[in-house]
Image (cartoon, rainbow, N blue to C red):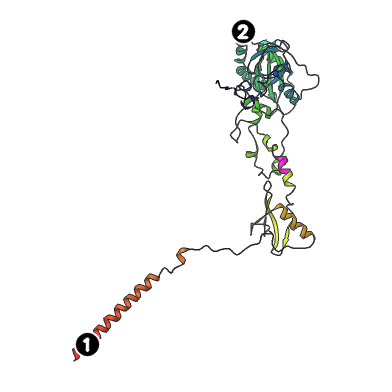
């Protein structure tokens, strides 16, 4: 009888078609890639360009696109070359997450990239590094307070995007004219922040993983010092700052959990009164819910760690004018002394036996000497 070796689709695990190249930033896994009819649910396609720049296009021609395909998309002017990163039903969700401005035009995909398109694209990419260095020198000569962090050429080489960082408003109209005369392309200036620049450059964080802004984080939220204060982190700028010299984005990840757990911790300025004395707040472990108190305001003396619930109970008793017997409610028993086998017997007991033997021998020798003397007298 022939056996059936087909595998249940629910047990197949991850789909290989949904995996992308790991050298692309903001890489996404298309877990719907192997679902039948997924391509027909939506004609929207997510296309990624240099570094973290992504855009969305209509697949009006119904091209059989898969993740990783190079496509020529509509641009203004000409066309651009990008890599397909997502297709099917997940693209509308990504489009909603991107929070595009109302009225944003969604262009279309022309075709899959031809060899001539790819060759022209590589030629344009080869010019980006030199263009960035020259443009920085031009901006410096014009006396502009800005930093050009990256340059991206369009796939057909007709336009170049200059990404710059500036603290204030910059009048770069003269800069655009000089750049257009120097490089003979259409110029587009885009201002980005320090966090966006770090995401475009990429790198590794102190945690040992790739930076979040280069892997999955798109929307950047402001990070304040209050996030570190709620988590009881020492305000050390060298440890709190990321690769972009700004506060780490990961400080916001757990701040809500710490804020919720911190509501159960008693205030620092409230002292607990017991019959043993006055206990002062020393430190707290917010997530475990333990609070440590000291009998001295200025130094660690008789440190005692109690739960936040117990601290609230003592606070309630103090507000009523009562004082508990001790800070913690644990009944203390007399410590059990460990049994030492060496203490069960006296270590000098063998010495006493030797002394007795010596004493007996001495007595016998004295008696024998006395008997010998009496015989000699006779």
Is residue 257 located in the magenta-colored stretch of the structure? yes
Is residue 191 located in the magenta-colored stretch of the structure? no
Would you say 342 lies left or right of 171 here? left
Residue 373: mark:
1
Residue lying at the far bottom in this picture: please name it.
378
Q: Quadrant of residue 256?
A: top right
- Say if mark 2 contacts mark 1, CB within 8 Å: no
Q: Magenta segment, principal secondary structure?
A: helix
Residue lying at the far front in this picture: please name it.
1
Cα separation between marks 2 and 1: 135 Å
Provide residue 286's location: percent of width, then percent of height.
Answer: 69, 47
Instruction: Mark 2 vs mark 1: give the one in front.
Output: 1
Residue range highlighted in magenta: 254-259
Q: Quadrant of residue 27?
A: top right
Q: Earlier in the sequence, mark 2 or mark 1?
A: 2
Between residue 222 and residue 22, name the one nearer to us. 22
Residue placed under numbered mark 2 in the picture: 116
Q: SS of the residue at dot 1?
A: helix
* 117 is higher (above) or lower (below) than 318: above
Total numbered labels: 2
Provide residue 348's location: percent of width, then percent of height.
Answer: 40, 70
Provide residue 59's location: percent of width, then percent of height.
Answer: 72, 13
Q: Is residue 198 visible?
A: no
């Amino acid at each position: 009888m022939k056996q059936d070796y087909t595998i249940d689709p629910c047990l197949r695990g991850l789909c290989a078609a949904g995996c992308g190249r790991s050298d692309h930033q903001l890489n996404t896994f298309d877990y719907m890639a192997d679902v039948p009819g997924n391509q027909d649910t939506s004609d929207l396609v997510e296309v990624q360009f240099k570094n973290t720049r992504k855009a969305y296009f209509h697949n009006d021609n119904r091209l059989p696109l898969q993740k990783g395909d190079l496509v020529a998309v509509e641009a203004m002017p000409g066309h651009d070359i990008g890599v397909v990163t997502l297709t099917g039903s997940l693209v509308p969700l990504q489009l909603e997450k991107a929070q595009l401005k109302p009225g944003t035009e969604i262009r279309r995909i022309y075709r899959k990239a031809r060899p001539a398109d790819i060759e022209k694209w590589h030629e344009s990419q080869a010019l980006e590094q030199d263009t960035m260095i020259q443009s920085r020198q031009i901006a410096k000569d014009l006396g502009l307070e800005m930093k050009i962090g990256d340059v991206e050429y369009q796939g057909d080489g007709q336009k170049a995007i200059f990404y710059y960082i500036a603290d204030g408003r910059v009048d770069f109209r003269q800069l655009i004219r000089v750049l257009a005369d120097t490089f003979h392309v259409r110029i587009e200036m885009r201002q980005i922040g320090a966090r966006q620049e770090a995401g475009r450059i990429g790198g590794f964080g102190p945690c040992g993983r790739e930076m979040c802004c280069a892997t999955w984080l798109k929307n950047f939220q402001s990070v304040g010092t209050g996030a570190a204060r709620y988590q009881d982190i020492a305000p050390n700028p060298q440890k709190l700052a990321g690769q972009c010299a700004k506060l780490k984005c990961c400080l916001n990840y757990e701040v809500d959990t710490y804020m919720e757990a911190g509501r159960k911790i008693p205030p620092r300025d409230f002292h607990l009164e017991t019959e043993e004395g006055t206990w002062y707040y020393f430190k707290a472990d917010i997530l475990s819910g333990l609070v440590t108190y000291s009998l001295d305001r200025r130094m660690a003396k008789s440190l005692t760690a109690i739960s936040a619930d117990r601290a609230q109970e003592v606070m309630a008793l103090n507000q009523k004018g009562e004082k508990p017997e001790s800070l913690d409610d644990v009944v203390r028993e007399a410590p059990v002394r460990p049994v030492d086998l060496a203490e069960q017997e006296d270590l000098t007991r063998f010495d006493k036996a030797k002394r007795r033997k010596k004493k007996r021998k001495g007595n016998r020798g004295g008696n024998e000497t006395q008997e010998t003397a009496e015989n000699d007298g006779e």
